[in-house]
Image (cartoon, rainbow, N blue to C red):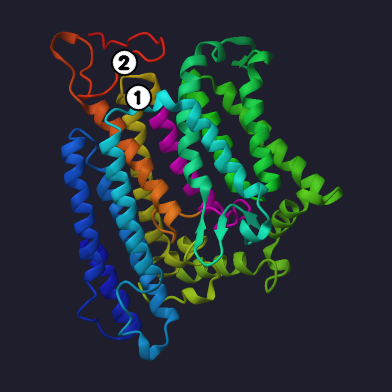
Amino acid sequence: MVLVAAYAATVEANVLDTVTPDFWIPAAALGLVFLGLHLVIRWLAPFADPALLPAVALLNGIGVGFLRRYDLAEAAPEQRETLGIFAGFGGQQLAWTLGAVVLAAGLLAVMRDHRSLSRYAYTLGLAGIVLVMIPAVLPARFSERNGAKLWIIVPGLGQIQPGEFAKLALLAFFAYYLVRKREVLSLASRRVLGVDFPRGRDLGPVLVVWLISLLVLVFEKDLGTSLLYFGMFVVTLYIATERVSWLLIGLILFFGGAYLAYVLGDTVGGPFANFYDRAQIWLDPFAEPYDRGYQLVQGLLTLGTGGLFGAGPGGGQPTLLPEVQTDFIFAGIGEEIGLFGLSALLVVYLLIVERGLRAALAVRDSFGKLLAGGLAFTLGLQVFVIVGGISKLIPLTGQTTPFLSAGGSSLMANWLLIAVLLRVSDGARRPVTGGGGPAARPSGGPPEQLHGAPTEVIRP
């Protein structure tokens, strides 16, 4: 939070040519919120990984700081010095952070053992599918922004992105399902070039999720969301079976489906036309730099302007970049902190992912391994999808940057993700009983044996 306060002071020095006496208040408010969560974690999950909260707090704080910087740029010059701390996008993000942290603390209080999620696996799976499909069936005026149908828009009240919560529900279902079916899915039918491929009759679950991801691609008009859902299932499947063939099959199915949608968009049109248009913009955004390609072109120019070291906090021009507070916040920040600064932020994300994978390796039950591994990979994949979109590596997506972008649904869903990782890491780091016996489990948690699964014992 000291770093966040220094960032806020530098912004005001560059934008206002002075530093107001209140520059430190957002960082202090965030510090109190995160200190409260730290105390809750030490009480409810005392063995949880201590690196997760500081890393996420830094990203969240930088996001709030940049959104206030954007508010200062948007305000009239005579109003900037008197702009309230809780005004604009920055103030809203500060309030959403408080709500998200309280929600994460509540989840830790209710879920004393991550294995209790498996009891509601099928309910969570159904809820996840419903949340994914709601924007697709709603009229465009209630679900579409910037060509992607990912929202539930309530006129006069705001909007939520249900897919952010759907990924958590679906991952819990995937982890439970694959724990029960991993023995069957691990069976090989033939070996090709040193890779063991599964039996044809075992391809059913992958084909179903592939079909759902294609429906998301076509009807919600977003490649990133489709890739996110399908990718997290295939990787969770790989973690469960340790078969590289599932990764190869997943890549072939996804990119084959995306190419088929592109071809159909060019020849048939209809629901495939939007994806074709977005792919065309990605292939050559400078063909129409002031029309369809404007947002991507401005993003590339913004990153180019930032160079290696950036223009400094408050020294950029974020108002020239459409949707800089949500979809393109990584580019807006990049203009001011440069390639080195963006690399540092990516390393912080990488640290969170690595800690999640470490919890997955250390936890003693199979459900926890798949859940933590899937959550960590999903967070990393979402960052890849966003950074890939703004840097023209892949077509643009409607995804938000975790903990940085403005928006309550994204912030709350990602803090819930961190709460689950904290709970899993607490179970993983909790000391075992003496004599090489069974792992000690959290008080009040369910037994290791779930739905007939054999009890897992740590052997000396």
Q: Give the SS element for disc 1.
A: helix
Residue at the spot x=50%, y=18% of the render? 241
Q: Give the SS element for disc 2.
A: loop
| Viewer can see residue 365 | yes
Q: Label 2 sits on what residue type?
A: Glu
Query: Distance of mark 2 from mark 1, alpha carbons?
Result: 8 Å
Rendering coords of residue 416 (x, y %) = 37, 43
Q: Earlier in the sequence, mark 2 or mark 1?
A: 1
Q: Is residue 186 above or below residue 263?
A: above
Displayed quadrant of residue 398:
bottom right
Judge from the rendering whether residue 429 lies leftward or rightward of residue 324; answer left or right.
left
Rendering coords of residue 374 (x, y %) = 45, 33
From the image, tell me which residue sits under label 2.
Answer: 448
Judge from the rendering whether residue 266 lies leftward or rightward of residue 110; answer left or right.
right
Judge from the rendering whether residue 218 lies leftward or rightward of residue 112; answer left or right.
right
Q: Quadrant of the C terminus?
A: top left
Residue at the spot x=33%, y=36% of the render? 421
From the image, tell me which residue sits under label 1.
Answer: 115
Which range of residues does the magenta coloring cover? 370-399
Q: Nearer the viewer, residue 122 or 457?
A: 122
Q: Label 1 sits on what residue type?
A: Arg
Please tell me how many numbered marks the rendered image carries: 2
